[in-house]
Image (tube, rainbow, N blue to C red):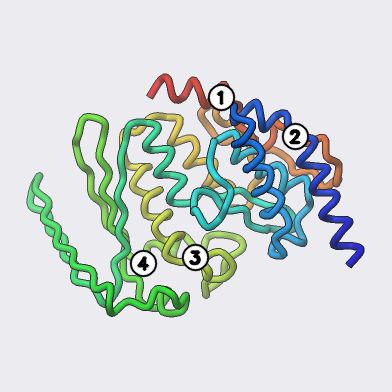
Amino acid sequence: MATALTRTDEIKRGLVSVQKQLQSLLQDKRKSDRFMATALAVASDRNLSACTPESIIGCCVAAAQLDLNIDKNLGQVYIVPYKGAAQLQIGARGYNVLLDRAGWKAKVFPVYSTDEFSYEFNGWDEIIKYEPDYDARETESPKWVISNLDKVFTAIKSPNGEIFYNVMSVGEIEKIRQKSPNQSAQPSSIWFDWYEEMAIKTALKRHIKRLPIGDSVQTVVAIDEATEKGKAVDVRKSVEEGAVIEAELTTDPAYDVDLNVMVMTKQGADQESETT
């Protein structure tokens, strides 16, 4: 019991050490206070108990820099464990937020074995038929989702109204999942608990990479992919350079959090918004 309390106190101290930075980033005290409360709840998640507190706090700060909500139930970002450190992974809804800021809109549809779906391509014309059978779905069961998800269909609209479509099979999604160093033949951890959400994110990210979307969003995609592969990323430098810049993760449980690691400056985010 004493160890748990000590860890909670350490996490609180760490969050307090970056509180002013968070207020500056979020530009709203009430929003900052809510973020701090959510950050403490996330940092105290037992699934992150083996992660260093500074890596968890670094992920929270990085999410604030991207102005994404860290509550995993909202699906914007997830903080997951990997080799004793916490990793920040952007969720499908997080990508929707980033796309919206850049003037793009996205719709994503999971297609199950119980649904009717057909996709025909004839020159420049694309004919899509999709009839989901919600009554036959058992999406409350992770095992059912994993066994019955067949593909993910994405539709992305550009600022000028042009619509792009893409279909990604579950086989393609599985190949990408299994390349992750914290995954094996069977989905585990975040992929087991949130298989549909992770599959949607994978398909959406694949589609984004194929479109002429601004470099800022593409850089975030590249950062996210590097993080999923277990790499430590210097987000600020990555955004500035337009390419993934790796950084060493510290294992010293100190709370002078290096904001150059896993962080994109608010100024960079503001400039990004102005140029899109």
Mark 1 touching mark 4, by CB under 8 A? Answer: no
Residue to which mark 3 is pinned:
194
User: For the residues carrying marks 3 and 4, which lies nearer the camera in this image?
Assistant: 3
Give the side of residue 120 with respect to residue 222, left or right. left
Describe residue 108's horizontal placement relative to residue 256 as left or right: left
Question: Which quadrant of the figure contains the N terminus?
Answer: bottom right
Look at mark 2 in the image and give the residue it sits on.
Answer: 18
The residue sitting at 71% across, 32% down in the picture is 259
Measure the C-alpha gap from mark 3 to mark 2: 30 Å
- Name the residue type under label 3: Trp
Q: Is label 3 or label 2 in front? A: 2
Mark sitting earlier along the chain (3/4): 4
Check the image and report above or below for 29 versus 157: above
Tell me how far mark 1 sits from mark 3, CA to CA.
Answer: 32 Å
Q: Residues within 10 Å of mark 4 (few under 14, many from 20)?
A: many
Q: Residues within 10 Å of mark 2 (few under 14, many from 20)?
A: some
Label 3, secondary structure: give it: loop
